[in-house]
Structures are given as structure tokens and as C-alpha cells.
Amino acid sequence: MKNKIYKIIICVIIGFFAINPITCLGQDTGTDNQAINGINQQIQAKQDRIKMMQDQQDIYNKALAQKQSEKATLNNQLAILDNRLAKAALDIASAQAQIDQTNLEIEKVTIEIQDKDTQILNQKNHIASILRLMQTQDDKSTLEILLLSNTLNDFVSQAKYLEDINKEINRSLDAIKQDKGDLIVKQKNLSDAENQLAAFKLQLEDKKVKLATEEETKIYIINQTDSSEKEYQRLLKLATQEQQQAEADIVNLEKTARAKVEKASGQDVQFNDTGFIWPVPKNTITAYFHDPDYPFRYVFEHPAIDIKAGQGTTIRAAASGYVAIAKDAGRGYSYIMIIHGNGLATVYGHVSKIYVQGDEYVVQGQSIGLSGGTPGTNGAGPFTTGPHLHFEVRLNGIPVNPLDYLQQ
């Protein structure tokens, strides 16, 4: 009889901890497995779709690189804008598919965790029952067990059963705890990934807005040129000359302004701030420093970051310093340059209204003008990508990445 009891206990333990827990326990995980299999199929479908879109993105990237390497023509510029718009829409669709995939993976892990929770609860109940049986057995002395056993072999077998049960319980509990811990970590990682992808989706939505603005720029270019290649080339030449002149003025006037301050004060300009603040509210960056995707890269290498800002947004000095130049170019490219200590200077481009003048000392955060950039408005220049602030940081006259200096 005792032998049969121990065999039943072994069956319960083995059945509970076996790979297929239906044995002895009667648990049915078929529904969960079916749900997980269905989710896996959906995840695979999302992955296939993402791969297809990535292949299409590569095609757009190659087309953009090809057009950007060709001669600057009206048709080429319009083709670049069209490719960028199509690629942005594909980027957004790809991000959404990645978010959907992550949600499915989180759902899958949640089901697995719930299943483990159920298994652990059942473990507790079954182990409690086993321990009660073992406790009943422990209340008998070794002599009683020996006397009640039919043979010495039965006694030895019963003792071995108890030893095996203890080992199996400890091993299985450790394994289940490890599995549950791994699944919880996995769920957290996937939740983090979902948050990152959601943020990425917001960035792409901003990019879509930016490219919609570029679409307006495209319409503006067509209207300005009346679809004439000759007129486009005239405007392109004007923009190139304007940028070259601005670059020369910035380099020369920075040296002149520093020399003037040093002569007047007997020392170099001092940097008395904790760092650069954002000149307009921290917002979406629509073009990065030396951005390879900059739509007018054939005009000049983008030496700044473009920060999205509504037309007429207040521009504030990123740090204290002296105004080296505040150029109002009417409908041309208007900008302000401020020199700071440590060989640093900042440039604020596409300014629609200027509040300061050359040689004026400004303090960090002081209002120095209003942003612009809307095609055809004051300060925008012949070619622009819509309302934003063109913001440069220069070190000893050479443009450097503003994101390395702006407070995060």
C-alpha cells in the first residue's frame, strides 16, 4: 500500500513538471498554445512586410543618391522632393508595422507569463499536498516504516522515492522561477521597445509634416520659376552666391569682432554661461549637421541644424556675447551672428525680424529676433524648406555640430 502511495506521488510530481503537463495533472494548455501559434504567425507576417518595405527604402535611397549626384536642374530637384516624400510615407508605414509587431510580441509574452503564473499556483497546491503526505510519513519512526514494509526492498524503495521527490521539487521550482524571471525581463524589454517605437513614430510624423512643407516649397519653386529651367538656374545661382557671401562675411566679421572686443577691453571675450540653451523651444530637428539628405545639398554643405519653429517664433541668444553682424537682406537670406568666449560663435539664419545690431552685447536668453523660413517671406532667401531656424555653432570659425553643445 505504501509503495502505491509513493508511486502516485511520483506520478503527480513528474506529471506536473513534465514538458507536457497534461499527464497526471489534467492541465490543458492547448488554448494558450493555439493563441501563441496564431500570434507567431502574425509576427512573421509583420516581419515579412517590414523586410519588403526595407527593400523598397533601399531603392528610394539609391534613387535619391543618384539624383543628388547629378547636375542641379529643376527636374532633378522636383524628383528629389518626390522621392523624399515617398520614402517618408514608407518610413512611417514601416514604423507602424514595427510597433504592431512589438505589441504582438508583448501579447505573446503576457500569455506565457500568465501560463507560468498558473503553473506556479498549481505547483504550490500540489506541493502542499505532497508535503502533507510526507509529513504524515515523517511522523512515523524509521522502525515503524521498516516493520510496516512487506520487505526490506520495499523500505529502501520508499526511502528512495522520498529522496527523488525532494530533488525533483527543488530542481523544478528553480527552473520555473528562472523561467518566470526571464519572461518578466523580456516583457519589460518589449515594453521599452514599444515606447521607443512609439517615439520613433512621432518623429516620423514630424518628418511627414516637414516633407509636406517641402511639398509646399516644391509648389513655390514651380510657381517662382514658372517651370522654367532657365529661371530655376538663375535662382540657384543667386542662392549659391548668397550663401558664399554669407559664409565669407561670417568668417571675416567674427575675426574683426573679436579683435574689436579685445582692443576695447584688453582681454578675449569671456564665456560666462553654463552652456548653450536652445535658441527656440526644443523641437523637431528637420535637418542635421552635414545632413546627407538635405534637399539643397548641391547648393552648400549644411553647416547647421534646422530646428522646426513656426513663422515668427522668438529667437533667443544661446549664450551671452557680442553681436558680430545682424544682416537684414529683405527677401534674401537674413541672419544674426553672436561671438562668445572659448572661440565659439553662433549663427541664427532665416530671421524674419531682427531686434539687435552689430557690436551690441546680449545676455543668454535675450530675445534677438523672430524666426522665418516660409518661402517668399522676409529673411527666407531664394530656397528654403519652410518655417524653421537655421542654427550654427562655430569653433574658431569652423562649423561644428550644434548638438554637441546644446543643453540636452
Image (cartoon, rainbow, N blue to C red):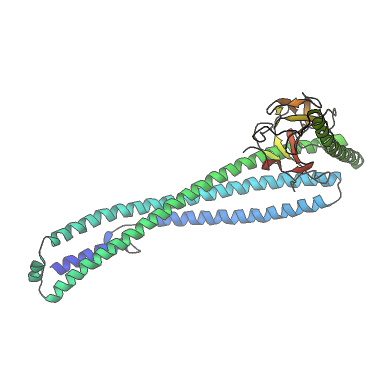
Q: Residue at x 17, y 60 (%)?
A: 134
- Residue that lies at the very extreme toward the top in this rendered image: 355
Q: Is residue 125 left or right of residue 153?
A: right
Regarding residue 127, the answer to whether it shows in the image is: yes
Q: Residue at x 84, y 45 (%)?
A: 75
Q: Quadrant of the N terminus?
A: bottom left
Regarding residue 382, the answer to whether it shows in the image is: no
Residue 33 % position (x, y):
41, 57
Residue nearest the viewer, comparing 143 with 184: 143
- Residue that lies at the very extreme toward the front in this rendered image: 266
Q: Quadrant of residue 313?
A: top right
Q: Residue at x 38, y 57 (%)?
A: 178
**In the rendered view, would you say 337 is above or below 87?**
above
Q: Quadrant of the C terminus?
A: top right
Q: Residue at x 30, y 52 (%)?
A: 121
Residue 63 % position (x, y):
76, 53
Residue 222 % position (x, y):
84, 37
**In the rendered view, would you say 252 is above or below 357?**
below
- How many numbered discs? 0
Q: Is residue 219 left or right of residue 129?
A: right
Residue 306 % position (x, y):
72, 38
